[in-house]
Amino acid sequence: MLEVAGLRISFGPREIVGPLNFTVARGERICLLGASGSGKSMTAAAILGLISPRAQCSGSVRVNGHEVLNIRVPQRPADARVAMVFQDTQSALNPLVSIGSQLEEPLRRHGGLDAGAAREEVRALLASIGLPGTDAFLRTSPAEISGGQRQRVCIALALACRTGLIVADEPTTALDVVTQAQVLEVLKQKTSAPGSPGLLLVTHDLSAAMRVCDRALILAEGRIVEDGPIDQILNRPRHSFTCELVDCACEGLHIVREVA
Ligand SMILES: Nc1ncnc2c1ncn2[C@@H]1O[C@H](COP(=O)(O)OP(=O)(O)OP(=O)(O)O)[C@@H](O)[C@H]1O
């Protein structure tokens, strides 16, 4: 579904990413894990067609067989669309439009559903991610629900776009730990069923990556330094960043054990 080959991103003379090579197939859940400043969000932005015009990108990003690098979202072919879930749910949703209308719109536009069918699909979608599909909830504004509920609505919106790939950039960083776990579980469930879209989860949070993904790409200073099954990488970390990540996670567990 996604093929990234020789992707390089620079600002002027400073290369911040590259060269990157990886693929994400439909139904695969892969995390791009790296420290702050390692180039995760720039990589996601290049894939999504949202990168700053000041950035120079070279190489290739193919979505569903279409070359999309340096092509802005409105100019991309319909079957090369990528759905996205961001940390900032306030900006991702229109505060002036009800949740029901925001979710119906892509189902009508991309799914070809009429108003009645789209509304029923929205109810089913919301119920499947633990939100009420009631008329009252559909009429609610995004500003009237909690951050965790808003992030579930954002996941529903990504699914309603019916793309083959979802890119989620730090989707749970702004949430408390319990809500994080619930939202990650929804993300995993909705990308695990047969025919599900592929997922590229961009995060610096090892536990989030472990909850959702099967494979990890470890990014350090703009380069992939490890790539493989996440449990294998974490059992035998090779790069210094991965070793630090695993040590920190183990220290955290040790504190929990002592307190208990
Ligand atoms: N508009 C810009 N102009 C120049 N450099 C930039 C610009 N945006 C980001 N960078 C640089 O690119 C590098 C990678 O940034 P990026 O946001 O991708 O990191 P990240 O891994 O997502 O970090 P974080 O987890 O903190 O969000 C950083 O060193 C940053 O300073």
Image (cartoon, grey):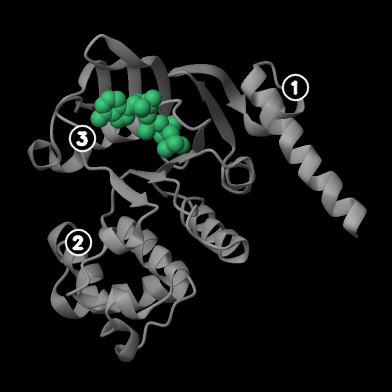
Q: Which residue is mark 3?
A: 49
User: Would you call the spot at circle 2 few (<14 residues within 10 Å), some (14-19), or many (20 or more)?
Assistant: some
Give the label, 2 or 3, closer to the camera.
3
Mark 3 belongs to which amino acid? Gly
- Residue 230 in the image: state x and y as whole percent: 64, 32
Quarter where residue 158 is shown: bottom left
* Element at label 2: helix
The secondary element bearing badge 1 is classed as loop
Residue 191 in the image: above or below residue 3: below
Whichever of callouts 2 and 3 sits on the residue coming sooner in the sequence is 3
| Residue ID at (77%, 45%) | 252
Q: Quadrant of ligand 1?
A: top left
Distance, label 1 to label 3, CA atoms, is 35 Å
Helix, strand or loop at label 3? It is loop
Residue under the image location 14 percent in, 43 percent down: 78
Give the residue type that dot 2 points to: Pro
Q: Residue under label 1, please give it.
A: 236
Q: Amino acid at mark 1?
A: Arg
Image coordinates for residue 85, horizontal then vertical, percent: 36, 52
Q: Residues within 10 Å of mark 1 (few under 14, many from 20)?
A: few
From the viewer's perspective, is the residue at label 1 or at label 2 nearer?
1
